[in-house]
Amino acid sequence: MQPREFITPAQIVVGSGALEQLGDQCRKRGWRKALIVSDKIMQSLGLVTRVEQLLAASDIGSAVYAGVNTEPVVEFVQEGLQIFKDAACDFVVSVGGGSPIDAAKAIAVMATNPGSIEQYKGIGKITTPGVPLVAIPTTAGTGSEATLYTVITDQKTDVKMLIGSPYLMPTVAIVDPLLTFSSPPGVTAATGVDALVHAIEAYVSVKRQPMTDIFCLSAIELISQNIRQAWSNGNNIEAREKMMLGAMQAGIAFSNSSVALVHGMSRPIGANFHIAHGVSNAALLAVVTQFSLIGDPVRYAEVARAMGEPIEGLSLMKAADRSVKAIRRLVKDIKIPSLKQLGVERERLMELAPAMADAAIDSGSPNNNPRKPTRQEIIELYALAYEEDD
């Protein structure tokens, strides 16, 4: 086995009530003033104020940028960075779903790197460590609190820019399942499937490594066997705790072994049709898994097993195919809408499919898939995904 890096946040605080440790975690590191990056929903729920209070109780000042009200765009990074500089902050705290955390990552690195965030599209282009970052997720989904990636949309080109660097890894992740109680069923479903996709793709990725395998299988089991309960009863603390842990494990896993074809195809759907990332992932997961099975049936059979499918006594391909059945049943049970149900027109989808296939290939993610698709196969997979609810 060749040497591989395995990168995580410097410190992870996980469990119910973990948020209460925020002030202590920051004070012991000598940080003085935070830029709190969030959105209007977290602000209206009082969580931003609670973060301010916890910091103040440890004699730490703060300024607030709560403008991340969609998936993050370049403009949010610029606005947040200006407040960071004007308020003379020295670290960043992000609180919310994947969007505030992704925006905060970009703000933290742009505080120390020249130019604009668009210059750093791709992997390994950030040259200087950013300011310290504390990530506090409020959804069990993106795992962004434990990844070295951020996705920022360039509105001029409608391209979701994947940016990757060890310098994007948060310094501290505070993972408190109590913060997910306000997450409505639709968000719980979409973000949960996003986390499941992270775990599955990291497990079958050609860049996988033994350390990530451990996190992947645990995350697949935790998410697939608890998401229905968290979706149907948001106050189920045990289900919420397991979803939060699974999402973080999935984030750690894909951050170290990468995602694959689903993510490569999903980003262009989100950029062109403004569909939530978890929903576009859900639309693609079953058809892409069906396409990919033959590339590594042993791994997909283990995915099925982790999802609770009985595979003993089955042939290898039939066992692997159980993963597709489990995915379709899960997406149906938690009522994630299909592309058709969301109002996407088939003609428009197929008109854009060649350009979306090019964008998927350019992202590099399809190359990590156990079965490498051609451009035409990606176009055909978009068509199959549209027919998923027929």
Image (spheres, rainbow, N blue to C red):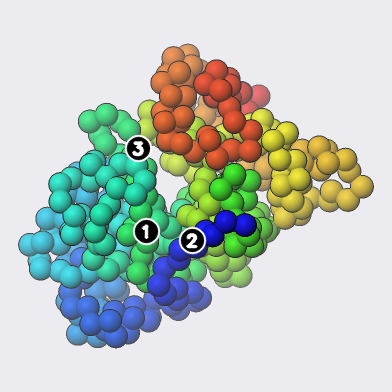
SS of the residue under disc 2: loop
Task: Measuring from the top left, give residue 136's x and y in whole percent.
Answer: 38, 66
Q: Earlier in the sequence, mark 1 or mark 2?
A: 2
When the figure is inspected, residue 241 is found, relative to residue 199, above or below; the finding is below
The answer for how far apart the CA atoms under marks 1 and 3 are is 20 Å
Q: CA distance from mark 1 to mark 2?
A: 10 Å
Residue lying furthest front = 2
Question: What residue is shown with label 1?
Answer: 166
- On residue 5, which mark appears? 2
Q: Which residue is mark 3?
A: 160
At horizontal 45% and vertical 69% (from top left) the residue drawn is 175
Camera-side residue of 230 and 287: 287
At 50% from the left edge and 62% from the top edge, which residue is drawn?
A: 6
Judging depth in this view, the residue of 367 and 267 nearest the camera is 367
In the displayed structure, 79 sits above or below 45; it is: above
Categorize mark 1 by other alpha carbons within 10 Å: few (<14), some (14-19), many (20+). some
Identify which amino acid the numbered label 2 is placed on: Glu
Camera-side residue: 36 or 123? 123
Q: Quadrant of residue 32?
A: bottom left
Q: Position of residue 108 (x, y in %)?
A: 24, 60
Q: Is residue 101 above or below residue 236?
A: above
